Image (spheres, grey):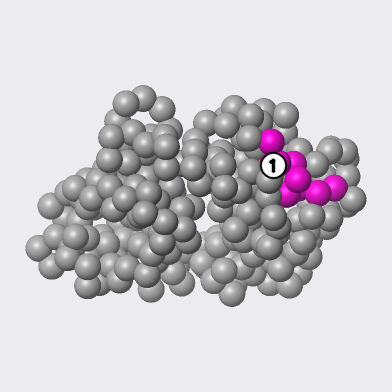
Amino acid sequence: SSSEIVGGHIGKDSSLEAQSIGGEWSVIALARAGKLSADKAAKYYSELCEAVKANGSDRLSDRKPTENARVIIALSSLGKNSADIAGHNLLSGLDDMDYITSQGINAVIFSLIAFDTTDYSAKTHDELIAYIVDNMTGKGWALAGNTADVDLTAMAIQAIAPYAADEKVNAAIDSGLEFLAESLDENARYANGSESTSQVLIALAALGIDPLTDSRFIVDGITLIDALDWQQSVLRAAS
């Protein structure tokens, strides 16, 4: 299956470098898939603790709150407590709304996702939800510019999905889903390929929507899973 192929491919990389985009996302993917060895998990955690200690602050970056968010999500996937990493609280590092929004809505989205992988009572939690809902671009969300983006819209839905019982949040989600459905081509694919498809699948899962049966995300019998399998076969053939 695609998940086994991708898991095997990531697992071959022995260098899950702490505080690197490839490092954290690989840890998250492998841990959630049950494919991260205890040795690799321990090595990553040890290296991260050393990096945080050397950094000497609850904030891993002065300009990029997504650094904290990404690491928190990775630590949660390992069952680790982000509130005490080498004596630093990476969660309280995201307790300032001005700091988070300085990097844009992407940071807001991932800060909320990060907090929700923990039981931390963040001062900014409710503000993050409101900011996402109040800062839509058209029917969805955009990293920049005036046109909604599939990837960011799917990520935003993932972040606010737990709060769908709220009427305003639910309306924003419905709008985003409409945009995601409209953005599919005749082969149930997105312009940006497998990353977009994967983000949308995660968003649907967060809402409890079955991509194999929801007609909004099936094009002439082709599902998002079919599209992802096709994209994986193309990548496999090219390697």
Residue 5 forms part of the magenta stretch: no
User: In the visual, does 229 lie left or right of 45?
Assistant: left
- Return the residue found at the far top: 145
Q: Which residues are magenta?
A: 88-96
User: In the visual, does 89 lie left or right of 74?
Assistant: right
Quarter of the image containing the N terminus? bottom left
The dominant secondary structure in magenta is: loop
Up-down: is 205 above or below 234?
A: below
Residue found 36% across the figure and 54% down from its top:
167
Tell me which corner region of the image, top left, top right, bottom left or bottom right, holds residue 164. Answer: bottom left
| Image x and y of residue 123, in percent | 68, 46
| Image x and y of residue 194, in percent | 35, 53
Q: Residues within 10 Å of mark 1 (few under 14, many from 20)?
A: many
- Return the residue found at the far left: 220
Give the residue type that dot 1 points to. Answer: Leu
Of residue 174 and residue 227, the one placed in the foreground of this image is 174
User: In the visual, does 216 lie left or right of 67?
Assistant: left
Of residue 100 and residue 48, the one placed in the foreground of this image is 100
Residue found 30% across the figure and 30% down from its top:
147
Residue found 35% across the figure and 62% down from its top:
204
- Residue at the spot of label 1: 94
| Image x and y of residue 220, in percent | 9, 63
Of residue 215 and residue 132, the one placed in the foreground of this image is 132
Please say whether residue 200 is visible from this viewpoint. yes
User: In the visual, does 159 lie left or right of 36?
Assistant: left
Up-down: is 67 above or below 167?
A: above
